[in-house]
């Protein structure tokens, strides 16, 4: 019957449409897992790669780039600069989706040994005191803190930390200001949390 022919035609068209193979390029982030306890990543850790994918039209259109990532296992990594090859093991793709290419195919990373050391906390002073007032003395409590940090290279400057800003424009008398510590992500406090810092500012003409 005509209706049966029509149904077969639509069914055939659906199969052809679903079976059509397409290609798609998506950009996804690289995530790092299982870093050794005595090592830390240094430098730019925000890495992305472009994945060239192929698959049936219906499956490929359902691929959401925000749900994909490349995972690099660093458990066997050593200190220093090294290159990691991105393979199929680093990526979990939806069913029926194939990876044609990855750009870049290698990720260069630098890992540094973690050391414990004592670093100075410096107050971040902004602006100037009103009128003829001048700072007579600055006291920082605590003025030092023990941290875990990447081992310094020969060209690296000595490490110091700063407080959140202290604005002098509204200070007219001796003042005590409580601040937070500002630190790069690679520097972590030995005690797991940064101390609250008190800065005592004594002023006079």
Image (cartoon, rainbow, N blue to C red):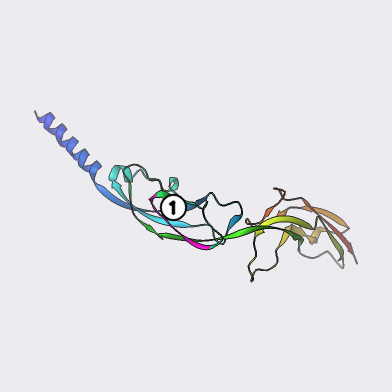
Q: Position of residue 118 (x, y in %)?
A: 75, 59
The residue under the point 44% across, 45% down is 67
Q: Position of residue 197 (x, y in %)?
A: 78, 53
Q: Is residue 86 magenta?
A: yes
Q: What secondary structure is found at the residue carrying circle 1?
A: strand
Q: In this orientation, which residue lies closer to the viewer: 187 or 53?
A: 187
User: As drawn, is 193 to the left or to the right of 178?
Assistant: left
Give the labeled residue for mark 1: 28
The residue under the point 23% across, 43% down is 19
The residue under the point 79% across, 65% down is 128
Report the magenta stretch's main SS.
strand
Position of residue 15 relative to residue 191, above or below, is above
Q: State which quadrant residue 204 falls in.
A: bottom right
The residue sitting at the right extreme is: 205
Q: In this orientation, which residue lies closer to the viewer: 184 or 116?
A: 116
User: As drawn, is 112 to the left or to the right of 203?
Assistant: left
Position of residue 156 relative to residue 94, above or below, is below
Does residue 182 appear in the picture of this structure? no
Q: Position of residue 167 (x, y in %)?
A: 77, 59
User: As drawn, is 175 to the left or to the right of 111?
Assistant: right
In the picture, the quarter occupied by the C terminus is bottom right
The residue sitting at the bottom extreme is: 155
* Residue span colored magenta: 81-88
In the picture, the quarter occupied by the N terminus is top left
Q: In this orientation, which residue lies closer to the viewer: 160 or 181?
A: 160
- Give the class, few, some or many, for how many residues have Cα within 10 Å of label 1's Cα (few <14, many ≥20): some
Q: Position of residue 70 (x, y in %)?
A: 44, 51
């Amino acid at each position: 019957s005509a209706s049966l022919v029509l149904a077969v035609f639509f069914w055939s068209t659906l199969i052809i449409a679903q079976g059509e193979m397409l290609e798609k390029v998506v950009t996804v982030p690289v995530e790092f897992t299982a870093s050794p306890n005595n090592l830390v990543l240094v430098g730019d850790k925000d890495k992305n790669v472009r994945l060239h994918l192929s698959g049936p039209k219906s499956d490929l259109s359902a691929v959401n780039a925000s749900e994909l990532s490349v995972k690099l296992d660093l458990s066997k990594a050593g200190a220093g600069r090294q290159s990691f090859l991105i393979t199929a093991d680093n990526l979990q793709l939806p069913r029926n989706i194939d990876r044609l290419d990855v750009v870049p195919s290698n990720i260069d990373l630098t890992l540094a040994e973690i050391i414990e050391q004592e670093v100075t906390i410096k107050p971040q002073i902004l602006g100037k005191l009103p009128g003829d007032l001048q700072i007579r003395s600055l006291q920082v409590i605590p003025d030092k803190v023990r941290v875990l940090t990447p081992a310094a290279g020969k060209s690296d400057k000595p490490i110091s930390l700063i407080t959140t800003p202290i604005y002098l424009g509204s200070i007219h008398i001796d003042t005590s200001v409580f601040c937070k510590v500002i630190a790069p992500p690679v520097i972590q406090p030995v005690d797991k949390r940064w101390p609250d810092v008190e800065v005592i500012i004594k002023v006079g003409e």
